[in-house]
Image (cartoon, rainbow, N blue to C red):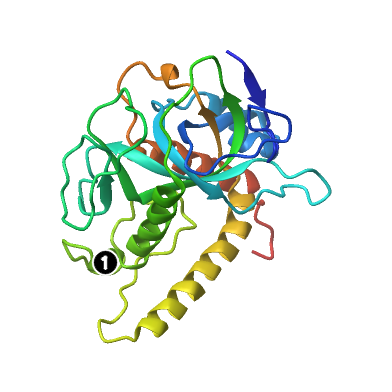
């Protein structure tokens, strides 16, 4: 199968200079070795290569994420924000999801998303609380490809609803207290915060814009520093068995960050 290694922002398979089409479906898998390569540490690389690899997770491209300029003097690499799908809705807050037809609808105001083609996996739900902002280490592509994709309207609606769910996470039923255990794959996502019911519509819009701007600024800084890499596949046949679950990505990402912390930690001196 053809592979694009270390793709730039305009290296999307198809034609020269192609950029990622928003609404495209992809398979995603964390790449531990690529994520620690910049540390230039043999022990860390060996530990990363020994990590158990999770199964492919399905997602939809929402846009370019921050941190695409790893080297200001070099061509920007491909860095994507991908909203993740799960087998069934989230366990803690099922409402934070949208069913992919023909999966059953769970909430009146969250109708099924009807794609233009069927997918080979059953019981799919978009998890609005799980997105991944990653640098792409390689792209697998072949003769088979996803026929299904989201329309511009579906893609934009999902982007807005997912962001709103993150902002109002604690107020989504079942209501939770502040600082729960986060299930976000992307640590740059802001913790949920409820807007008051009596706030004016314009005030709520201003707050949302401000929070979004803050999220984008933090993403630009953090994704470069943490350098989580993933490989993606445009070929659904790469996952003939059951899909992985978004939460399965948490453990390798946690281990990668621990390795980065240990590698960067400086030895203590008399001034410590």
- Image quadrant occupied by the N terminus: top right
Give the camera-side residue of 50 and 265.
Answer: 50
Q: Are there few (<14), some (14-19), or many (20+) residues within 10 Å of tag 1?
A: many
Percent across and percent down for residue 110 are: 23, 53
- Image quadrant occupied by the C terminus: bottom right
Is residue 265 in view? Answer: no
Residue 244 location, quadrant = top left
- Left or right of 246? Residue 89 is left
Picture layout, residue 242 above or below residue 215:
above
Percent across and percent down for residue 216 are: 56, 62
Which residue occupies 61% across, 54% down? 66
Q: Identify residue for label 1.
A: 170
Is residue 238 in view? Answer: yes
Residue 168 location, quadrant = bottom left
Give the camera-side residue of 123 and 71.
Answer: 123
- Left or right of 34? Residue 118 is left
- Left or right of 136? Residue 188 is left
Which residue occupies 43% across, 22% down? 236
Picture layout, residue 104 above or below residue 272:
above
Picture layout, residue 57 above or below residue 113:
above
Percent across and percent down for residue 242 are: 30, 22
Which residue occupies 24% across, 28% down? 122
Which residue occupies 65% across, 55% down? 268
């Amino acid at each position: 199968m053809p592979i694009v290694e270390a793709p730039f922002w305009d290296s999307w398979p198809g034609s020269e200079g192609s950029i990622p089409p928003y609404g495209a479906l992809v398979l995603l898998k964390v790449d531990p070795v690529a994520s620690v390569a910049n540390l230039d540490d043999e022990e860390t690389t060996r530990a990363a290569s020994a990590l158990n690899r999770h199964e492919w997770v399905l997602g939809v491209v929402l846009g370019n994420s921050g941190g695409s300029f790893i080297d200001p003097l070099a061509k920007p690499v491909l860095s994507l924000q991908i909203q993740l799908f799960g087998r069934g809705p989230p366990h803690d807050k099922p409402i934070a999801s949208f069913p992919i037809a023909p999966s059953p609808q769970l909430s009146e105001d969250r109708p099924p998303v009807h794609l233009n083609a069927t997918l080979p996996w059953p019981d799919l739900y978009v998890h609005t609380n799980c997105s991944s902002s990653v640098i792409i280490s390689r792209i697998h592509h072949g003769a088979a490809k996803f026929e299904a994709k989201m329309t511009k309207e579906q893609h934009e609606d999902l982007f807005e609803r997912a962001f709103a769910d993150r902002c109002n996470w604690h107020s989504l039923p079942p209501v939770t207290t502040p600082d729960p255990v986060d299930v976000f794959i992307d640590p740059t996502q802001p913790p949920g915060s409820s807007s008051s019911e009596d706030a004016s519509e314009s005030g709520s819009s201003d707050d949302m814009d401000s929070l979004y701007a803050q999220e984008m600024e933090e993403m630009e800084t953090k994704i470069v520093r943490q350098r989580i890499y993933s490989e993606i596949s445009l070929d659904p046949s790469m996952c003939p068995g059951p899909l992985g679950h978004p939460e399965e990505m948490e453990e390798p990402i946690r281990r990668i960050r621990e390795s980065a912390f240990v590698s960067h930690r400086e030895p203590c001196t008399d001034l410590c």
